[in-house]
Amino acid sequence: MFGAAIAYGLSRAGVDTLMLDGHDNNLRAARGNFGLVWVQSKGKGLQRYADWSRESACLWSGFAEELTDITGVSIAHRNDGGMMLLLGDEEVEKRKLEIAEMSKQSGATGYDCEIITHADIQAYFPDIKLGKAVTGASFCPHDGDVNPLKLLRAMHSGFVNSGGRYKSRCTVNTIDHANGVFTANTQEGQFLAPKIVLAAGHGISQLAESVGIDAPIRPQRGQVLITERIQQVLPMPLNSVRQTDEGGFQFGNSEEDIGFDDGTSLDVVQNIALRAVQSFPQLSTVRLVRNWGCVRVLTPDKCAIYEESISHPGAYVATSHSGVTLAAINARLVSKWIATGEQPTDFNHFSASRFHVQAT
Amino acid sequence: MFRRHDKLSQAKGDNVTIYFEDVPIICKPTDSVAAAVLLSDPGYTRRTPVTKAPRAPYCMMGTCFECLMDINGVENQQACMVPVRDGMKVRRQNGVPILPGDSKEPGND
Amino acid sequence: MTEPADLIVIGAGPAGLAAASLASKHNLSVLLLDEQAAPGGQIYRNIEHNITHESETCAILGAEYAYGAALAETCRASDVTYTPGATVWRIDPDGSVAYSVNGAAHTAKGRRIILATGALERPVPIPGWTLPGVMTAGAAQTLLKASAMLPSGRVVVAGTGPLAMLVTLQLIDAGADIAALLETTRKRDYFSNAMLLPGAMAGQDYLRRGMAMRRAIRASGVPIYGGVTELEARGDGQVSSVRGRSGGERLTFEIDTLLVHDGVVPNIQATRQVGCEHEWYEPQRYWRPVRDSWGTTSIDTITVAGDGAGISGARAAEYLGQLAALDAACRLDKISMADRDSAARPIRSAMQPHTAIRPLLDGVFTPSFTTPHGDDTIVCRCEEVTAGEIRTAVAQGVMGPNQIKSFTRCGMGPCQGRNCGLTVAELIADVQGVPVSDVGYFRLRPPIKPVTLGELAAMDLSETDS
């Protein structure tokens, strides 16, 4: 997701760009993405990232329109807000505390998120019954969603249409650097350029090290369930449930520290299914058609890393697990930074050096 | 589209009556719903979600999913895997199924 | 918590029935799960009912069908716990199995699992194949077996493979109006392969029987056209005609039913979902699980038997089931390796004539419809993705079946690639100019068959040791 968005932006700006991609059965976190353009849960501990996510959400509508205009691929972007459903009083209290913390952290900027009641929620969803177990939700007007697979396809298409070159089965094994030129060594040959962007998700840490950047990422699995198609009844995404534009209900949001295993497990699937039918009892006769695991690319504080190498200027790292939310801002501002050097405001907050700050 | 073999048309054992689009069909207890539907004309089982094209059973062994039908109010059932039962109400599935159950009904989950 | 069974057998066709029965005889506790309401799989579908109540159907289907009754009887008489109507939707390498019966999901655990899920028909992506009235030859045979039904109007049978001829003859015997048999088998395949195998005496016998079938078909007044190409089904909302070309001649038949057949391929949904390694079998262009001479896959707890391991027919399936059972008994310390091997010897001998003809059959009846020619032909029936859309995506750099799925939705529908997986791989290979074996296949995920959220939520996971 990161690579495609940045490459798209570069290519649209007229920069000669070559995108090197791995194999069909690599981990490929982009294929497992839930599709949320999400703001309300971002940036705890790093206000700059909370703002960054919100800025991206605001750029998203224009980005979506542009993608559809250029490629003809409709990506089903919705931007009317989103909710985190809360089941039971404990979840509501916990969320209230989190909202208070984020409001404090955000200061003057503010944190647009409020708790709404069961009746409020049901009013948003006249065509599907809300379960009694739902005691509230936190609503954020900036949240939304998009069809992540169509998004990826549209970005690829837009990239290629603007003159970008794409090579698959071309995993970059090592990178050499001499006289201001980077050489990417792959099984299909060597590729040279004065600038190189590492947006390879799970492939990133070793490569980044070789060009003098620290990119500490760890894997975290999330399992996703998708059902058969049903007529549209859920007009707004929730943090762990959304109805795709094709009609399937998608559920997820588990967090498992299990390494690079993209498999699935019945206990987690059951928990997800249970929460789904507690939230919307009518879904109990709807059928699951597919269940997969996807390995998130997580940084230590779950916020993005953007960095240009000091020892190897021209080498960049860009990564976060929120590839869909950030696709708009990646395509617009991050590609501009890479092309022209123009940094977004306070961009140094996203350097990986923040993980090495000594406790004072 | 299909008919019973001449020498076997006298049903041995109990007949079963199902209703396909409100029209009664006499079947044998060992028939699947899909087989019973094929006794009528037109014997198509559904219209597709993408283009509303009509489809009918293709494999009769549960691998093609063309026989997805509404059986007694529950949609998306593979009719070739469901044995007929007396009084069953069978309807074609029209595109994408609706959300089952009652959205307006208050009360217990 | 329930004690794990020694053996879980999935599939009650010849391989599954034979495996379960023999394993039980060797004192293994066996759980046999099958999604149909009665034993027999597809080849012996509805055998118990027919052998007792439908002698006419049995007469039409022949002695080879009636043979299956004994397999079902032996299993019923054994100590096997047989659960019909059980749809298995998830298998794990540790021997756990999740399945649904009567709207409730359950889990079970076996110390070993034998997968005997059989075969399915190779997809036949010709123009118009999604029209109502176009079905597989196997489907028509199933309707005869399960419901004593036959097509009511005019029928053409088209394609290649022993089943196409067999079904044609059976339907003629049953009284169907068959307008023609259109064989896509390339004429030269017959001749160049007939001489292929020294010592394949059974092959000569088979060829003779095949020739006899063809004579019988012709004698009944049904023409057989050979070397047919450019097959196309036409109609508006329902099939009304079929076209093709044979030699220089254009053929058109007005019909009500078109039965297509392009051979059968192993059903690899379960073996792929659990993660077994697969290999490409070039002569018949399908994937089959990698296994040893007992059927053990790349996952040590899981054995495959029958057509699901590689197409070898009903009789071989029975013997492969027995071999798998013997190996299971040995691995679970019920019999010694020496006893296993000596019991296996007569089974392998009995199996030999059935497997010896395979290279001949595979060489003669090579697949005819692997790559759709037209761009408008539907490849993914569920999502209505055409060959042209897939070709375009590949030309734009899409590298493999999973990315095709991601970009076009091909393979995301309810059938989860059962009817398009092979075609997609062939198309990618064709456009990229690489061997199909390099292209790979869809990543298959659970559930193997759909299961409701309610069932999942209510499942008792403590039924097995997790």
Image (cartoon, coloured by chain):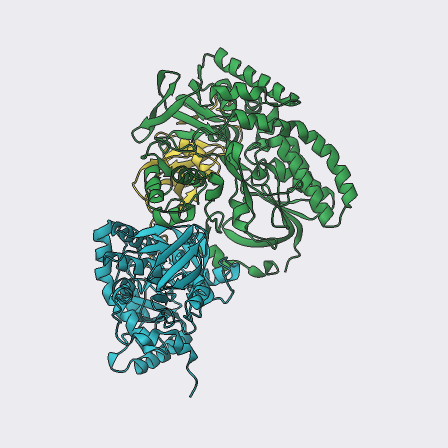
Q: Residue A299, how many percent across, how many down?
A: 42, 70
What shade does chain C have? green
Q: Is residue A271 above or below residue A162?
A: below
* Residue at the extreme front: A179
Q: Residue A140, how many percent across, how many down?
A: 28, 70
Which residue is more in the foreground, A19 or A117? A19
Looking at the image, which residue is at 67% across and 31% down?
C351
Is C391 displayed left or right of C462 in the figure? left
Residue C78 visible to an observer of this rendering: no
Q: Is residue A118 above or below residue C363?
A: below
Is C61 displayed left or right of B109 in the figure? right
Q: How many marks?
A: 0
Q: Residue C382, how many percent across, how many down?
A: 38, 42
Residue A91: quarter of image: bottom left
Q: Is residue A78 above or below residue C440?
A: below
Residue A331 visible to an observer of this rendering: yes
Looking at the image, which residue is at 22% across and 52% down?
A70
Q: Which one of the lettered chains is coloured yellow? A: B
Q: Residue C278, how many percent across, how many down?
A: 55, 44
Residue C380: quarter of image: top left
State the quadrant of the C terminus of chain C: bottom right
Looking at the image, which residue is at 38% across and 25% down?
C231
State the quadrant of the N terminus of chain C: bottom right
Which residue is more in the foreground, B58 or C291? C291
Which residue is more in the foreground, C152 or C180? C180
Q: Is residue A129 above or below residue C142?
A: below
Q: Which one of the lettered chains is coloured cyan? A: A
Which residue is more in the foreground, C90 or C68? C90
Residue A11: quarter of image: bottom left
Looking at the image, which residue is at 48% across and 48% down?
C444
